[in-house]
Image (spheres, coloured by chain):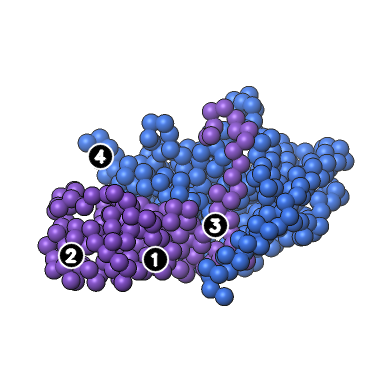
Chain colours: A blue, B purple
Amino acid sequence: MSTAERIEAARVAGSASTANDAAPALMARLQRGFAEALARRPGALREADYLFAGRPVRLRVVGARLAERTHRAFTHLRRPGAAAGVPALHIDVWDEAETGVAGGIDAEADTPDRRWLACDGTLIASPDGRFVGFLYSESVSVLDRRAQRLVSCRRDGSQLFTGDASKPFILMLSIWCHDRGVQVVHAALVSRAGAGVLIPGVSGTGKSTTALAAAAQGLEFLGDDFVGLERTCDDDFLGHSIYDTACLARDSLFRFDGIRRYAVEDRFARDEKPILFLSEVFPERLRATVPVRALALVRIRQERTEVRRAGRGEALRELAASTLHTVVPRPGREALELFARLVERVPAYRLQLGPELEDIGRGLEAIISEAGSADDA
Amino acid sequence: MPELESCFAPVREDVAAKVIDGELIIIRLSDCTYYDTDNVGARVWELIEGGHALGGIIRAITAWYGMEAGRVERDVAALVEQLLAEGLIAAVPARAIGEPPGTAPDGPLPAYEAPQLAIYRDMGSLLALDPPTPGIDELLFREGQPPGERA
């Protein structure tokens, strides 16, 4: 069966599904589960307030080990409750193993709501789109987009996959960001003196190496893989950090002498990339939001690091190809318009990565300087 | 070859396209298959979007690039057939649109080259799971958005 035929068959199957209330029922069950976990283990509650894409978010975790790991990826976005304001999103999570409260992680395999395979799990949605859930082998999560509440249960907070530890709730947060006019893009983001360089690219192009090399050279870090992109009413573009993590393959990490001792390898992560929590490495170099002033299109394995100006078409192609194929839910027409406007507004550069990490930082510095000059002109 | 009187239009519900700096990027949203072409291909797409009949498009490209009509006709027809085969455009009833302008609307053009539509199916196929990864349009929820947030 061809790709198009498979898609059509899946569409027909999807539209024929019985619309029911599985996702809202799942949400109700998860809310009860969280309340029970909290009642059983009130001393294991860890809560904190954050600003996600500039919006206040309250994250409550029941389970000491899970809490430590979940809060950790958002450390740089933490704000005292009073400063954060009324939360635009409540996230409640509990650890099934530590609290003894079952989340039914294995129980929802046959929910007949609209459902899709995505990110090694199953995405479900209520017919009206209000409730979106993600069922995964180690967790279950539901986002109520009206109530702006995300509830999740993790099987065992002491054993998280790399993705769960380094990018918690990425799928649900992508939807929440979309609802706020923020597009999650597959890109790294660094800055200097508040001028951001967005580094889009499919996996393996060198985004993480570039972002980490930049941070090691004194630039500011906002993300190595997924960041938020928001167009303001002034037609400016803001880049929002989501996580303080960077994930590098072991051979790439080995190149970072002074940093690699910070790498965290989870029990589940033997075949995955180690995680660096940059709030623990360069706390002073983390930023939450910066204006995007340039795009850097990176390529690795050149003899030496080189910078040249890139065309807008080339930049749009790279930005669109990297994000449209990797972000879930898949962005559509609006995202392409957003990317097109971005490449019209900011200059793009091709950054060919050589073997010397110090040169990467210098290349990015040169891009920021030149983009700043173009801005001034 | 399609009739010279035929008109076509992008399949709006499944296609996002953008021309920037003479480069055309098209994404088939249902499976994220990704296409690009430039120069003549991008001009042809813009003329299709403008509602011009195939004959008018061929005459415009011939005039704009100072080329021999027969070659342009073959090249443009081949591109249109490919766009049709990929489901990116569809035949539509002819509209009362005049001929395209006799010169390119935005100045001198690069040298003529037969349009090539590059197709990137490799990553698109990753999304063609069963059922495929959803697009955001499939998860729309507009009710109850708080004031100040997007409609």
In this rendering, position of residue A164 left or right of residue A215: right
Residue at 64 percent across and 30 percent down: it is A87
The answer as to whether the residues below labels 1 and 3 share one chain is: no
Mark 1 is surrounded, within 10 Å at the Cα level, by few (under 14), some (14 to 19) or many (20 or more) other residues, namely some
Report the chain holding disc 4.
A
CA gap, disc 1 to disc 3? 42 Å
CA gap, disc 3 to disc 2? 46 Å
Residue B49 in view of the camera: yes
Which-is-in-front pick, marks 4 and 2?
Answer: 2
Residue at label 2? B112
- The amino acid type, in three-letter code, at marker 2 is Tyr
Which of the pair A228/A362 is nearer the observer?
A228
Residue at 37 percent across and 35 percent down: it is A235
Report the chain holding disc 2.
B
Which-is-in-front pick, marks 3 and 2?
Answer: 2
Q: Are marks 4 and 1 in contact (CB under 8 Å)?
A: no
In this rendering, position of residue A106 left or right of residue A351: right
- The amino acid type, in three-letter code, at marker 1 is Leu
Whichever of callouts 4 and 3 sits on the residue coming sooner in the sequence is 3
Residue A373: numbered disc:
4
Q: Are marks 4 and 2 in contact (CB under 8 Å)?
A: no
Residue at label 3? A247
Residue A134: numbered disc:
none
Residue B84: numbered disc:
1
- The amino acid type, in three-letter code, at marker 3 is Cys
Quadrant of the rendering where the C terminus of chain A is positioned: top left
Q: Residue at the bottom extreme?
A: A1
CA gap, disc 1 to disc 2? 23 Å
Secondary element type, mark 3? strand
